[in-house]
Image: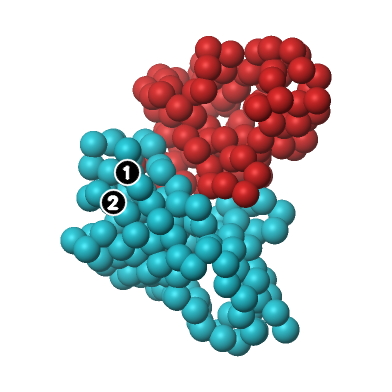
Amino acid sequence: GAGVSQSPRYKVAKRGQDVALRCDPISGHVSLFWYQQALGQGPEFLTYFQNEAQLDKSGLPSDRFFAERPEGSVSTLKIQRTQQEDSAVYLCASSSGPSYGYTFGSGTRLTVV
Amino acid sequence: GIQVEQSPPDLILQEGANSTLRCNFSDSVNNLQWFHQNPWGQLINLFYIPSGTKQNGRLSATTVATERYSLLYISSSQTTDSGVYFCAVEDLTGGGNKLTFGTGTQLKVEL
């Protein structure tokens, strides 16, 4: 597609509920990234894929967070047993490679109540 | 990890004014990008600039890698330039895969 598409745009979850956030990167982009942005702060790295391989997941805050990209295109970030501290905007970005700029999606704003 | 500091934290300009935003980083980098986050939350990549100078319309950026800083110049500012400007870097130990963002400069351009 023309840009990075994320869905849903907004998600309200009850504490303890599981959620799944979707990212559809720019067609042909090898690299895909997930970032978490808390209110008033800069985005923080969660995880990185090169094609279908998850090469870095050092930023995932706990084992409740899981990401996949099974066919090397669409990616899903799953959060199990959501907690209030998980409330944030989750941003997905894609890139042609390490020497190119990132294109970010519009993000999913998750609110855990 | 690498530290990224941006200044000023907040800036108010009259339309038509020029400004310079600064990004200092604590270690050598192989990736530096400037982003604009508009009031609706969309992050737009402005420049990929690990070194040197680039220009795009009213915006230009310069990175002096040996002195560990980058500057973003905005000329003839417009109200649509309002938002938060982020500098993001990756140090040399990475593979272009993990950007560390600064805390941003909040810019408001008034009529």
Q: Give B82 or A24, whichever is nearer the viewer.
A: B82
Q: In which quadrant will I find the C terminus of chain B? A: bottom right
**Circle 1 chain:** B
Dividing the picture into quadrants, the one containing residue A86 is top right
Tag 1 residue: B2
Within 10 Å of the Cα at label 1, are there few (<14), some (14-19), or many (20+) other Cα atoms?
some
Residue type highlighted by circle 1 = Ile
State the image coordinates of residue A66 (x, y, percent, origin top left).
55, 16
Give the CA distance from mark 1 to mark 2: 6 Å
Residue type highlighted by circle 2 = Ser
Dividing the picture into quadrants, the one containing residue B81 is bottom right
Up-down: is B71 above or below B92? Answer: below
Q: Colour of chain B?
A: cyan
Q: Which mark is residue B26?
A: 2
Chain letter, colour red: A
**Residue at the farthest bottom position:** B16
The reply, left or right, for residue A4 in relation to residue B103 is right
